[in-house]
Amino acid sequence: MKGVARREVRRVAEGVLQAPAEDDVVAEEPLEIRAQGETLAITMRTPGADRELAVGFLFAEGVISSRDDVGRVSHCGRPDQEGYGNTIDVVPGPGVSLDIDRLSATRRGTLTTSACGVCGRRSVDDVIARCTPLPVARGAIAPATILNAVDGLRSRQPNFARTGGIHGAAIHDTEGNVLSAFEDIGRHNAVDKVVGALLLSGRIPGSDPALLVVSGRASYEVVQKASAARVPVVASVSAASSLAVDLARASGITLCGFVRNGKMTVYSNPERIR
């Protein structure tokens, strides 16, 4: 299965080291993201849906704004070359010039790890400055929709079931229907994949995406990506960080954490929940 690798392990049971055995582990490889042939970032990711990942990343960074900006997205090199599949280039659509210079003051050419998507940023202020506040519509989404969406995320993580080491993200509409769902070793990559898929299908920007759910915690970058995609509600299985809460409040996003067992903590803009 793509996204999963096999490695030899030794287990300990009842204090005794067992014989060698094969086990599933999540795959992690670098992906160099290029635009117009120029390297913009290198991210550690789980292979699969690289096209969606690259497009979602560039959208979150403001390099592209719609599917009309995207022409061809393809891996570089030849299939018989070593490392093929680990470099991808986004070519703009006809008559489109991508604004790649906007990354020069943030993370251009830096390494994005699987644990932290913005380790190359020079300033957090750059993220906050680009968030346009969303209008807060009262009673726009039911608590049950949020709870059910988070509860259902695990069922859309086949590689988590095999490895126990991969994050998931999904975007739903206001009725709880799944619009896009992906896994990745990096939570931020999983979000880029779901956003990129919807952008390529023409649903982002749009009014359908209403709820982003993520496994684990809610970091400020998850909120930033939701803000860029105009997704008004973000829900996570675990806690939210202080900057994620501050950014959600400033950008008009309803941020929910500890969404499990029929309960949740609402950190910002609770009036959106009916």
Image: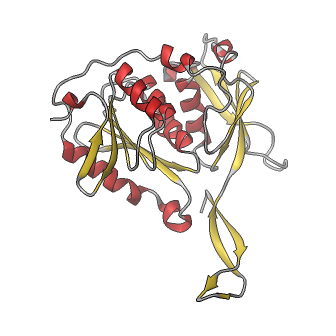
Residue 98 lies in what quarter of the image?
top right
Q: Which residue is more in the foreground, 130 or 24?
A: 130
Q: Which residue is more in the foreground, 171 or 78?
A: 171
x, y percent for residue 162: 53, 67
Q: Residue at x 56, y 65 (%)?
A: 163
The answer to whether residue 203 shows anywhere in this view is no
Q: Is residue 29 left or right of residue 221?
A: right
Q: Residue at x 76, y 24 (%)?
A: 37
The N terminus sits in image quarter: bottom right
Q: Residue at x 20, y 23 (%)?
A: 137
The answer to whether residue 222 shows anywhere in this view is yes
x, y percent for residue 34: 71, 28
Residue 73 lies in what quarter of the image?
top right
Q: Residue at x 47, y 50 (%)?
A: 168
> Up-down: is 207 above or below 261?
above
x, y percent for residue 182: 48, 48
Q: Is residue 269 left or right of residue 241?
A: left
Q: Which residue is more in the foreground, 37 or 273?
A: 273
x, y percent for residue 194: 47, 39
The C terminus sits in image quarter: top left
> Up-down: is 233 above or below 98?
below
Q: How is the image coloured?
A: secondary structure
Q: Is residue 75 left or right of residue 71?
A: right
Label total for image: 0
